[in-house]
Amino acid sequence: MKKGTFKGGVHPYEGKEISMNKPTAQLLPKGDLVYPMSQHIGAPAKPIVSVGDHVLMGQTIAEAGGFVSSPIAASVSGTVKAIQPTLTVSGAIVDAIVIENDNQYERAPGVGEKRDYTKLSKQEIRDIIRDAGIVGMGGAGFPTFIKLTPKNEDAIDYIIVNGSECEPYLTSDYRMMLEEGEKLVDGLKIILRLFDNAKGIIAIEDNKPLAIEKISELVAKEERIEVKTVRTKYPEGSERQLIFACTGRKINSSMLPADAGVVVNNVDTVISIHMAVAECTPLIRRIVTVSGDAIMNPQNFSVKTGTRYSEVLEAAGGFKVRPKKLISGGTMMGLSLFDVDIPVTKTSSALLAFENDPADIVPEGPCIRCGRCVEACPENLIPQMLMSAAEKFDDASFEAVSGMECMECGSCTFVCPAGRRLTQALKQTRRSILDNRKKK
Amino acid sequence: MKEMYNVSASPHVRSGVTTAGIMRDVVIALAPACIFGIYWFGLSALLVLLASVASSVVFEYLWRLVAKKPKVPYECSAIVTGLLIGMNMPSSIPLWIPVVASAFAIIVVKEMFGGLGQNFMNPALGARCFVMLCFTGRMTAYVVEKAESSHLWYGAASIDGITSPTPLGALKNLEAGASVSSAVSLKDMFFGFTGGVIGETSTIAILIGAAYLLFRKVISLRIPVAYIATFAVFALLFGGRGFDPEYLACELCGGGLMLGAWFMATDYVTSPITKTGQIVFGILLGIMTGIIRIASNSSEGVSYSIIFCNLLVPVIERYTMPRAFGVLRKKKEGGAAK
C-alpha cells in the first residue's frame, strides 16, 4: 500500500530510540495531587467538592463549566486540601483542586467494573465519554464527545486514530500501541459504533514497524478497520496533514475534520475511551514520556493526572547533568518550563530535559529569502512574508497572506538558516488578531 | 532563589543549517569554475579573484563600522559577492577595476538598500554592468596574447593565444549559410578552452558546482531549468538557424548563460520566494536573454536580463502567491462590482 504523506514538512532528529524500547512503568504519586480546572479547550471546569471532603479514586471532583468543557475526576483517594490558584504548563495561573493522597487508592463505586459496550446505545456511549472527562490527548485538549457528536453523523466516513507521533522524542503512543493495542482497537470499535458509515484507520509512521506489525495483526479480522502507514515526517500527526495523508481530503483553519467526513483521535484518547466505556474508569491517567539528553533513565510512565512533574522526574532518576531547558511536550511544539513544580494534566505528553538550548545558542541574523521556510511549511504559506507583516504589526497584510492558516508547527523556525524566530512572531500576531476579533 | 530553566517559544530545536554554511557551500560550488579559470588564464586571474574578494570583504567591514551596524554573526556573503565579481572580469583587467566594482556592489547595491537580504538587484551583476558601462573596452578585452614564456602567469590559454572574439561573438557574425563548426568548437566551449571572463568559459566546471548545490539542496531546479529551457526554445524558434542542435548547444554553453542561470539567477535575495514565481522568473529570464542575444547588437544578454528581472521580483511574487493548504479557490464574485 502506498504510504500517505503531505507536501512540505521537516525531519528533525527523532530521538525516539532513547525511550522507545523500555516498557511503561507505573508511577504512584507520593505528594499532593493538583488538578487545574483548565485542562482542555473551552470553559474551565467548576469544582463540586469543598475543602475537607473525602474523595475516592475516579470520583468526579469538578463538573463541566459549559458545553465546550470537560469534567475532572480524582486520580487517587484522599482529602481535598485546598482550592487555590496554581501555575500550569502554559504559564497561566488557574484555580486548581489540591488533594492529599491517602495512598489507599480506594475506588469510587462502580469504577473499574467491566461493562459490555455492545449493549449501550449511541447516546449512552457519548454520555459516558463526556462524563469521563475525555479530551483530545494529543495536545489540544478539545472535549472528545463534541468531536464524536457532529451535526450529521452519517456523513462521517473515516475515523482516524492518530498513531503517527511525529513529535521528536515522544514514544508514549508507540508504547501504548505495543502494550495496550487490544484496548486501542476495542476503543476504535466503540467509536465506530457511533458512526454506521465510517471506516476506521489507524495511522502509524513508518519509523514504528513493530507497532505497525502488532496493530495490523490485531485488526486482521476487523472488516471496518485498517492500518495506514504514513511517512515519517514532521508534522505528519497534525490533524489537517494526517487527514490528507490518509484520505486525500484537505481542510483549512475554518473547517472541522467533520466537514471532510473525518474524525481524528489520538491513540491515548482512544484507549481512554475504551477505559471509560468498557471499564467504567474516567480519564485519570496519562502516559508521559520522560526523555532528553539530561535525563538519567529515560522512559515512559503511566502517571496519575495531578502528579507533579517533579515526581515524574524523580522516577526517571532525575538529571544526569544540569539541563538548560525543560519542555512539556515535544521539541517542536512543546512548551518550555521554568519550573518542575507543575501538575501533569490530561494533555501532558512528555517531559523533556536538554543540556543545551538551541534557542539560547542560535543567533538571529537577517533574512536572506532563501525560501527554506516556504519549502518546509506544511500549510503552503510563505512564512517569510507572514514574518515581515508580523514585524510591522500589519494585521491586515498578515491576514491577506493567509496568516491565520498557520498552525504554529514550528517547521519554519526549525529550518531558518538565519535563526529567525518565525513561529514565535506568527504566534504572537495570530493571538493578537484572535483577541481583537473577540473584542469586536 | 529556586532554579529556573530557559523559557522560549517553540520549536526548541534547529536544523543546523546556517547562512554562513550556505555561503560556504556556494563558495565550494564556485571553486571548480574558479580553478579552471586560474588554470586557463593563469595567476593573473587568481589575482583578479583575490582583489575582488578581499575588497568586497573590506568594504563590507568598513561600511558596518561607519554605519555602526550591530555585530551579527559573520555570514560570509561578501565573499560570494566578491568571488562572483572576479569571475565576471577578464583576466587582463587592471586590478583597480574589480576594486571599484566591489565598492559599487557592496556599498551602493547592497548596504545602501539595507544590507544583506534587502538589495533588490544582484550585487555582483549590478557591479558588473556598472563597470561594463564605465570601462567597456577594458571589460571586453578577451584577447590573450600568445606568449613564449610566463605561461604560469598568463595561463594555459597563452600557449596558443586567443585572438578570436568570444564564441558568442563569432556565432553572431557567422554568415547565414556557414556551418556552426566553422566558427566555433563545441567541445572547446563545453570544457572552457575559449575566450571570455574568468569564471564563465567552462560549462562542465559550472555544472559540477551546480550539481553540488543541488545535492546540498542550496538551490532548486526551478529557476535554472525554466531559464535554460525557455532560452533554448527561444533560440530554436528565433535564432534563425532552425533546428540545429549544434547551434543550440553552442548558445547554451556560450557566454554567461550557465554561470548566470545556476549561480546568479538563483541568488536568494533577488529571486522570487514563491515556487511558482521562481518558474515565472526563469521563463522571463529565458525570454529576455533570447531577445538581447538574438535581436540586439550585443551578443551577451545574461547580466542585463538578470538585473532587469530582479526588478520584477516583487510583482512576480504578488501574482504567484500560493493558496494555503485546504483553502479553496475564491469564487469570482460577479456582483461585487455593482
Image (cartoon, coloured by chain):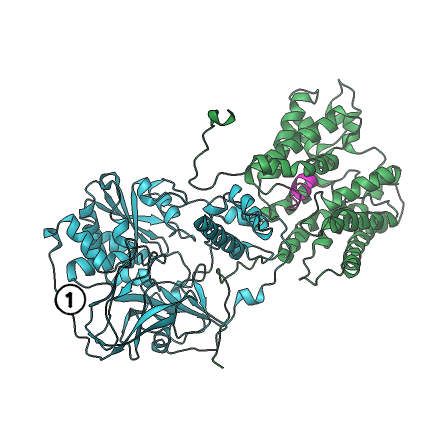
Chain colours: A cyan, B green
Q: Residues within 10 Å of mark 1 (few under 14, many from 20)?
A: some
User: What subunit carries mark 1?
Assistant: A
Which residue is depicted at the point 70% across and 54% down? B77
Give B331 or A47, whichever is nearer the viewer: A47
Give B157 or A389, whichever is nearer the viewer: A389
Q: Which quarter of the figure is the N terminus of chain A placed in?
A: top left
Residue A322 is one of the magenta-drawn residues = no
Q: State the extent of the magenta-drawn residues as a range.
A: B257-271
Give coordinates of residue B277: x percent, y percent: 58, 37
Residue with the most extreme top position: B177
User: In the image, what residue type sits under mark 1?
Assistant: Val
Secondary element at image label 1: loop
Give coordinates of residue B263: x percent, y percent: 67, 44
Instruction: Give the quarter of the image for residue A183.
Output: bottom left
Which residue is depicted at the point 16% across and 49% down? A123
Whether residue B310 sits left or right of residue A137 in the image: it is right
| Residue B143 seen by the camera | no
Q: Which residue is mark 1?
A: A111
Give coordinates of residue B311: x percent, y percent: 69, 37
Which residue is depicted at the point 64% across and 41% down? B271
Whether residue B69 sits left or right of residue B42 in the image: it is left
| Residue B315 seen by the camera | yes
Give coordinates of residue B293: x percent, y percent: 74, 28
